[in-house]
Image (cartoon, rainbow, N blue to C red):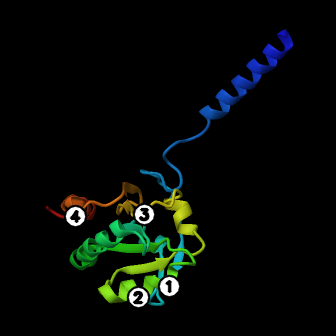
Amino acid sequence: MRRALTILTAVAVAVAVAACGTTSGATGGEPGASTLPRFTATTLDGGTFALGDHLGKDVVMLSFWATYCEPCKAEMPVLEQLHAKYAAQGLQILSVSLDGADTVSGVRPHIKKNGYTFDVVVDDDGTIAQAYNPAGVAPFMVLIGKDGRIAKRIEGFQASEAASLEREVQALLGLPE
């Protein structure tokens, strides 16, 4: 009995010491992370979006959505307005479709029908979602500041919060309200 207690205590101490050596909130896609997972993706229009090209110089908005998600569809006109208003000041919007094989065929028609001009990619292998939205929530947004760090994560969409989102973008761009 005494030997089992000694072994259990040793294991507990080892776990505690190991936990002390880890970092929290400063890796991967976590808010404030200094090293963000980089990716390169082909946009629907055939271009390339490389996150690394924008980190440290632009404000990047990653917006996760799906064609079957009504709140996502409601959010997209707001994204288009922000894109039209702030792209020249350094706002880069990447709309990341989470559509699977059964609904992906609706992505391009939805974008074309609504005349959206921001970059859109289909995350068919889940690489971008795994790095920034591992729960696969939609709508879900990640705002990355000019400093290359995650400034904010936003789950869901409420039309009443569009003005607040715009103020957040203005602040990250260093613009007056």
Mark 4 vs mark 3, foreground winner is 3
- Disc 1: which residue: 105
- Disc 4: which residue: 166
Q: Is residue 78 left or right of residue 150?
A: left
> Where's residue 148, x and y in %?
41, 61
Q: Secondary structure at mark 2?
A: helix
Is there CB contact under 8 Å for labels 4 and 3?
no
Distance of label 1 from label 3 (alpha carbons): 18 Å
Residue under the point 50% across and 85% down: 105
Quadrant showing the N terminus: top right
Q: Which amino acid, mark 3? A: Ala
User: Mark 4 or 1 closer to N-term?
Assistant: 1
Quadrant showing the C terminus: bottom left
Instruction: Looking at the picture, tell me which residue is in the foreground, 143 or 100.
Output: 100
- Disc 3: which residue: 138
Is there CB contact under 8 Å for labels 4 and 2?
no
Q: Secondary structure at mark 3?
A: loop
Distance of label 2 from label 1 (alpha carbons): 8 Å
Q: Which amino acid, mark 4? A: Glu
Numbered tag placed on residue 109 in the rendering: 2
User: Mark 2 or 3 closer to N-term?
Assistant: 2
